[in-house]
């Protein structure tokens, strides 16, 4: 989740150079090359059933394709700090979806966490922090201010996609290895974005992209497609989906840290308050209960 938060923030300068769907296609392409050897079925793993194939498609469509579109487009229209606060709603969303689809019990304090997350998002929507770096100036200033509400709305969609990703991933880890899940859902993402990527690549001037941007793109692709997915799926094999949500606290923390420390953004008083409220919701929704703590 710390890596996810980092690339959520660092995708902002990438989105200033590459069209969103072209960036997604390049991401899945680089990840596909890196994980080609992960596609082979390990010995002893059961063959894919129709249900597994449907879950793999949904995992990629929601967690890779739609999440990438919503997240990159949202960060492009708002600030990385705002993105970090909104992403703090992920644990509460994971807990709610786990209750709906995995039948995991959700304590009353989780609903209080959901309320805190919604309040934090509302406070972000009221903030008007301007982008302060030269990189951000590559984005149209009038769009970043007038369409910040749309960016925040897209990021809320990314939250729901990421929560679905966690819940579906829990179901997949029962039968498939983390490596193969990572490779298969990345392959679906590549297939979904290839028509758009080829069309946009035909008219894009790749020669104008500086070397430093290509290095950042490779880090973004490997972190988004390979490292974070494998780490997350490996963890989900032994941790309930709702409890796993507690670790997503590192996503908004690292996203805001990169936004402030690397991209030169500033935390306004209202955003700081929203950040505190959202993180309070994280603790309410995902902290272990007394019974769990007593059990060790």
Image (cartoon, rainbow, N blue to C red):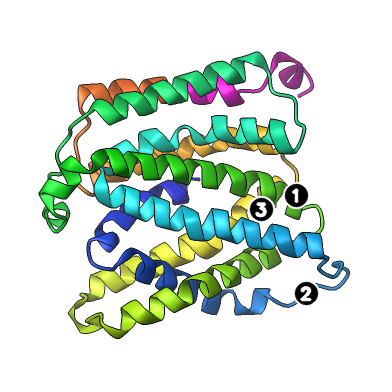
213 vs 194, nearest the viewer: 194
Q: Which residues are magenta?
A: 280-296
- The answer to whether 205 is drawn above or below residue 215 in the figure is below
CA gap, disc 3 to disc 1?
Answer: 10 Å
Q: Earlier in the sequence, mark 1 or mark 2?
A: 2
Under circle 1, the secondary element is helix
Q: Counting other residues with Cα less than 10 Å from the Cα at mark 3, is it few (<14), some (14-19), or many (20 or more)?
A: many
**Residue in the picture at 51% in, 36% down:** 90
Question: What residue is rendered at 23% in x and 61% in y?
Answer: 16
Name the residue that disc number 3 marks: 233
- Judging by the rendered image, the residue that carries numbered circle 1 is 171
- The answer to whether residue 289 of the structure is visible from this angle is yes
Q: Residue at x 73, y 78 (%)?
A: 40
Main SS, magenta region, reads: helix
Q: Residues within 10 Å of mark 2 (few under 14, many from 20)?
A: some
User: Whole-Å distance between the Cαs marked 2 and 3?
Assistant: 16 Å
Q: Which mark is residue 68?
A: none
Q: Position of residue 69 (x, y in %)?
A: 41, 57
Q: Nearer the viewer, mark 3 or mark 1?
A: 1
Determine if the magenta segment contains residue 265.
no
Q: Position of residue 33 (x, y in %)?
A: 53, 79
């Amino acid at each position: 989740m710390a890596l996810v938060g980092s690339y959520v923030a660092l995708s902002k300068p990438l989105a200033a150079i590459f069209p969103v769907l072209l960036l997604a296609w390049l991401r899945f392409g680089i990840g596909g090359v890196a994980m080609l050897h992960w596609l082979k079925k390990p010995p002893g793993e059961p063959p894919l059933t129709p249900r597994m194939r449907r879950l793999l498609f949904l995992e990629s469509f929601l967690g890779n394709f739609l999440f990438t579109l919503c997240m990159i487009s949202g960060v492009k229209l708002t600030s990385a700090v705002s993105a970090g606060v909104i992403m703090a709603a992920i644990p509460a969303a994971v807990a709610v979806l786990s209750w709906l689809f995995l039948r995991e019990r959700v304590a009353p304090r989780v609903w209080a966490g959901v309320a805190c997350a919604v309040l934090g998002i509302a406070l972000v929507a009221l903030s008007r922090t301007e982008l302060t770096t030269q990189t951000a100036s590559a984005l149209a200033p009038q769009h970043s201010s007038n369409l910040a509400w749309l960016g925040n709305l897209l990021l809320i969609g990314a939250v729901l996609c990421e929560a679905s990703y966690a819940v579906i991933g829990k179901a997949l880890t029962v039968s498939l290895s983390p490596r193969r899940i990572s490779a298969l859902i990345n392959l679906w993402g590549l297939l979904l974005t290839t028509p758009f990527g080829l069309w946009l690549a035909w008219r894009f001037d790749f020669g104008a992209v500086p070397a430093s941007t290509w290095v950042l793109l490779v880090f973004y692709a490997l972190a988004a497609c390979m490292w974070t997915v494998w780490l997350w799926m490996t963890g989900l094999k032994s941790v309930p989906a709702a409890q796993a949500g507690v670790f997503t606290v590192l996503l908004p923390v690292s996203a805001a840290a990169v936004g402030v420390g690397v991209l030169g953004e500033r935390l306004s008083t209202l955003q700081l308050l929203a950040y505190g409220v959202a993180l309070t919701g994280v603790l309410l929704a995902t902290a272990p209960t007394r019974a769990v703590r007593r059990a060790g």
